[in-house]
Image (spheres, rainbow, N blue to C red):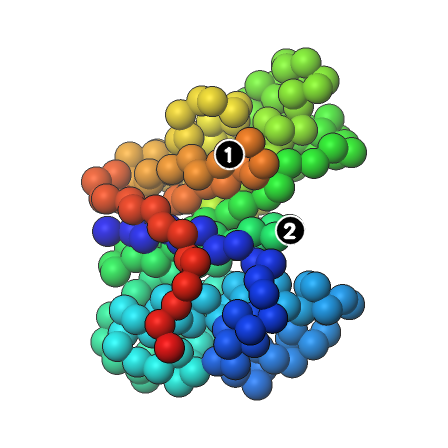
Amino acid sequence: MVEVWRVPLDRAPDEWLRLESVLSADERARAGRFRSEELRHRYGVAHGALRHLLARKLNRAAADLCFESGPAGKPVISSQQGTAPPHFNLSHSDNMALIAVSDNRPIGIDIERYRKGIDVAMLTQQYFAPGEARQILSLPDAEQAQAFLTCWTRKEAYLKATGSGLSTPLDSFEVSALPGSAPRLLTVAGDAQAANRWRFVDLGDETYAATLAVETLDIKVTKHDFLAFAN
């Protein structure tokens, strides 16, 4: 099973203080490098929520969890903290975060707030697979930015799930690109069976594009709102 948690990041001071209190020294230092108090608190809420969700699954204290870098820098729970720790992934955009947690399957999640002012033609033609670019640029101009961000979250969720990040060229694999289309991995260069192993779930709404990628076709996905947490 995969749990997907929706985490609003703008919280009352008592809430973000409690969530920030479980961060590690490294996380606090990273938060301190943000240029505004708003961004610092949003980081603290997102990563504090992640710690609480993982701690609940592991029956540990949130502040005691230790993370290390996996392949390509993807964060994982330290191997010294028990066998078969859960897979997880976090993404945030503006004032919303999504957290995905899976017992035993690689997962990736990405969220992007819809916005204007994107040079869609340049970005799609330079970075996306030709089929994706053709689909997006065939739309009316007013619809292209939403389609671009929809496609972007599908591609980014897959890259985050594989742990390869942007070291994998964005045009080396193709996803279904258009809003409203079934989210799918279509082709991967050098792996003819990849599309048969991956499931994509559309998590977007009228404000955000968002996608979950998980390496299995047969798995239950549950959705939750992170509104409160255990002490």
**Marker disc for residue 94:** 2
- Specify the quadrant of the image occupied by residue 125: top right
Residue at (35, 82) in percent of width and height: 61
What is the spatial separation of the Cα atoms under label 2 and label 1, in whole angstroms?
14 Å
Q: Nearer the viewer, residue 131 or 44?
A: 44
Q: Earlier in the sequence, mark 2 or mark 1?
A: 2
Where, by quadrant of the figure, is residue 189 drawn?
top left
Q: Is residue 85 visible?
A: no
Q: Is residue 5 above or below residue 183?
A: below
95 relative to 63, above or below: above
What residue is drawn where x is 57% and y is 85%?
Answer: 25
Q: Quadrant of the C terminus?
A: bottom left
- Residue occupying image coordinates x 59% and y 43%: 112
Q: Which mark is residue 40?
A: none
Along the line of sight, which residue is nearer the eye, 222 or 17? 17
> Whole-percent x and y of residue 78?
38, 78
**What residue is drawn where x is 64% and y is 15%?**
139
Q: Position of residue 199 (x, y in %)?
A: 33, 38
Left or right for 28, reference 91? right
Residue 198 horizontal side relative to residue 208, left or right: left
Above/below status of 176 relative to 48: above
Under circle 1, the secondary element is loop
Which residue occupies the foreground of this view, 109 or 95?
95
Q: Mark 1 = which residue?
A: 205
Which amino acid is tagged 1? Asp
Q: Position of residue 88 (x, y in %)?
A: 38, 61
Q: Is residue 162 left or right of residue 44?
A: left
- Seen in the picture, residue 135 relative to 221 is either above or below; the reply is above
